[in-house]
Amino acid sequence: MIWNKAKECMSLEDKRRMQGERLRKLVERVYHSTPFYRQKMQEMDITPDDIRTIDDIVKLPFTTKQDLRDNYPYGLFAVPMSEIIRLHASSGTTGLPTVVGYTRRDLSIWSEMIARCLTAYGATSNDIFTVAYGYGLFTGGLGVHYGVEYLGGTVIPMSSGNTAKQIQLMHDFGPTAIACTPSYALYLAEAMQKTGIPREEFKLKIGVFGAEPWTDNMRREIEAKMGINAYNIYGLSEVMGPGVSHECEFKDGSHIIDDHFYPEIVSPDTLQQLPYGEQGELVFTTLTKEGLPLLRYRTKDLCTLTDEPCRCGRTNVRMSRIVGRSDDMLIIRGVNVFPSQIESVILEMEEFEPHYLLVVERINNLDILEVQVEVRDGFYSDEINKMMALKKKMGQRLQSVLGISADIKLVEPFSIKRSEGKAQRVLDKRVFS
Ligand code: DLL
């Protein structure tokens, strides 16, 4: 089934014409409503008149997370706050979050996007969804929630965590679909097995998994353990949230909702646009967004694109799985974490040396972050109580900055290997490809 055949199966010619028209209107709009873009375009000596077709997009400036941070919180919003009806946020490198705002129309488009995704996974209004993405500032919970309602399905707004209760309600309420991060799905699957309840007593058949990188091996494992069909959903808060792209029944790349988000692949080094098929950094222009429209937003996600037709009949451009990032952002239990956030916590506490190592592992399908940090001479002690207190202090501070817990390992001064070149501060032992 296809939710919006008119848009999802458009001829490439019609699509490009429509994208060109939408781009022209968008550029006109941001030029007049957002001083940031007007100034950038003036610096590049271009005006909205220079944008005629979608191919002219290469003339436009890029936008980065840093730009959003420099204009924190609302500087890039293109409408008055009276028109913004929802805010979300995602973490930033300095602890300042990236704030995104939505108008009523933005939210309605977002819900329709999710309805398109869920339909591509084979879901209908008869399905009951348990949404175990976090609710709150993170876009996962509420984004999928309203999409399920838009589809006409039933939503169980579980949010993340509390695994025992998740399993009990999955058993009692009989959801047919689950939305959460793939690593949590694996964790849940094993916890479900441990309860000893026979699998037939659960009605789950569809999984809506994303917010972090995962592999086909993980997919097979989740599918086998839960007895479901697992689908990829991709998105990022700056661009909208979950639903920017989704798989279909053929699971052969993810269809980008490209009537709303125009994708490009660029070289992270030269920023030149690359042809389809080549791997590079994914860049999106939000063709229709009102609250926070973005020109050529650099996602830092590395992948390839293709416009080969898909067997499902959809004609939109498809993206491969994300194979890595062009910056150092880690995604731990679905939460974006920059090593620099951890570094700034370490630097602001006098008890620690600025020498640390972050070790990320996946144990029993759960991401574990270990922060090894050197205790400053004079603060290092043989007394276990003192060390425990120090560990707790650091743990609480990190939890409040990152929003996730970390295992703290206090080490003696000079025990972390010093580097002669670029310091290696992160050891990510997880395998994504
Ligand atoms: O993670 C939005 C989302 C929620 C997507 C629920 C899917 C499901 P952010 O917190 O802004 O937004 O993080 C965005 O997460 O740039 C990717 O690096 C990564 N990411 C998201 N989905 C996938 C995926 C949400 N399916 C960042 N595969 C993005 C790989 C993903 N990476």
Image (tube, rainbow, N blue to C red):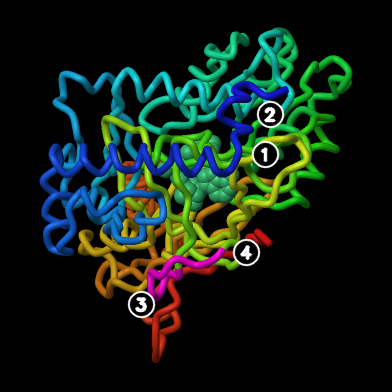
**What crowding class fits label 2: few (fewer than 14 Cα within 10 Å), some (14-19), or many (20 or more)?**
many
Nearest to viewer (mark 1 / mark 4): 4
Residue 329 visible to the viewer:
yes
Real-space CA distance between mark 1 and mark 2, rounded to the nearest whole angstrom: 7 Å
Residue type at tag 2: Ala
Real-space CA distance between mark 3 and mark 4, rounded to the nearest whole angstrom: 49 Å
- The answer to whether the beta carbon of the residue marked 3 is less than 8 Å from any atom of ligand 1 is no
Residue that extends furthest to the bottom in the rendered view of this protein: 420
Q: In the image, residue 409 lies at what x, y percent?
A: 46, 61
Decide if residue 231 is on the left or right side of residue 425.
right
Nearest to viewer (mark 2 / mark 4): 4
Real-space CA distance between mark 3 and mark 2, rounded to the nearest whole angstrom: 55 Å
Most frequent secondary structure within the magenta stretch: loop
Determine whether label 1 and label 2 are within 8 Å by CB.
yes
Residue 44 part of the magenta segment: no
**What crowding class fits label 1: few (fewer than 14 Cα within 10 Å), some (14-19), or many (20 or more)?**
many
Circle 2 is placed at which residue position?
Answer: 120
User: Mark 4 falls on what kind of element?
Assistant: loop
Q: Give the range drawn in magenta.
A: 267-275
Is 113 rendered above or below residue 97?
above
Q: Which tag, 3 or 4, sits closer to the chain's start? A: 4
Q: Which tag, 1 or 4, sits closer to the chain's start? A: 1
User: Mark 3 falls on what kind of element?
Assistant: loop
**Residue 247 numbered mark, or none:** 1
Q: Which residue is drawn at 52% across and 27% down?
A: 113
